[in-house]
Image (cartoon, rainbow, N blue to C red):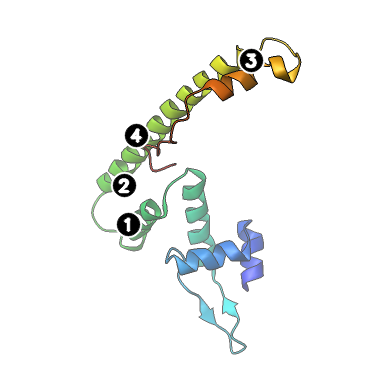
Amino acid sequence: MKIGELAKVARCTTETIRFYEKEGLLPAPRRSDGNYRQYQNAHVERLRFIRNCRTLDMTHDEIRTLLAFVDHRQGDCAPVNALLDEHIGHVDIRLAELERLRDQLKDLRRQCASAQAIEDCGIIHGLAAMPAEEKQPSESHLG
């Protein structure tokens, strides 16, 4: 199948497919005599695997690691379990960060209980009065 067909089957764009090829996550397909990419069912399965990992917010490095286990089925799945446990830890960190953000927003929202003139808006005044802090990078790889 051609790249457009693969994109349709995988429900993604051709740019996504080319990007994953460039990143080394999806192997380059054979080329036809007309230099068209010729994808196989194995590409569909691998692309589905990659997209499912991305849906779970896994990084490309995590996906590469998992794909290495898929490609070289040796040993047991303890390293896969460890990778997923580490990823769950990243998600837990991100959840805590989001809870802190939600609390800040709720505190700000409480400063303006009802609609009023902008010059009297507690949210506007609260935002103006907040100390300007540099955005801290996330402690998780999820960003």
> What percent of the width, then of the height, locates residue 36?
60, 81
**Are the residues tagged 2 and 1 within 8 Å (C-beta)?**
yes
Q: Is residue 77 left or right of residue 9?
A: left
Residue 122 is labelled as 3
As drawn, the residue found furthest toward the bottom would be 33
Marks 1 and 3, how far apart in space? 54 Å
Q: Nearer the viewer, mark 1 or mark 4?
A: 4
The local secondary structure at tag 2 comes to: helix
Front of the two marks 4 and 2: 4
Earlier in the chain: of badge 2 and badge 3, it is: 2
* Observer-nearest of 103 and 69: 103
Provide residue 99's location: percent of width, then percent of height. 47, 23
Instruction: Give SS at disc 1.
Output: helix
Q: Residue at x 41, y 50 (%)?
A: 59
Q: Quadrant of residue 95?
A: top left
Crowding at mark 4 (Cα within 10 Å: few <14, some 14-19, many 20+)? few
How many numbered circles does the render carry? 4
Q: Nearest to the eye among marks 1 and 3: give it.
A: 3
Query: Residue 80: which disc?
Result: 2
Q: Residue at x 42, y 26 (%)?
A: 96
Q: Are marks 2 and 3 in contact (CB under 8 Å)?
A: no
Q: In the rendered image, which residue does mark 1 sit on?
A: 69
Measured Cα–Cα span from mark 1 to mark 4: 21 Å
Question: Cα distance, mark 3 to mark 4?
Answer: 37 Å
Q: Is residue 83 above or below residue 37?
A: above
Q: CA distance from mark 2 to mark 1?
A: 8 Å
**Reading the chain from its start, which is encountered first: label 1 or label 4?**
1
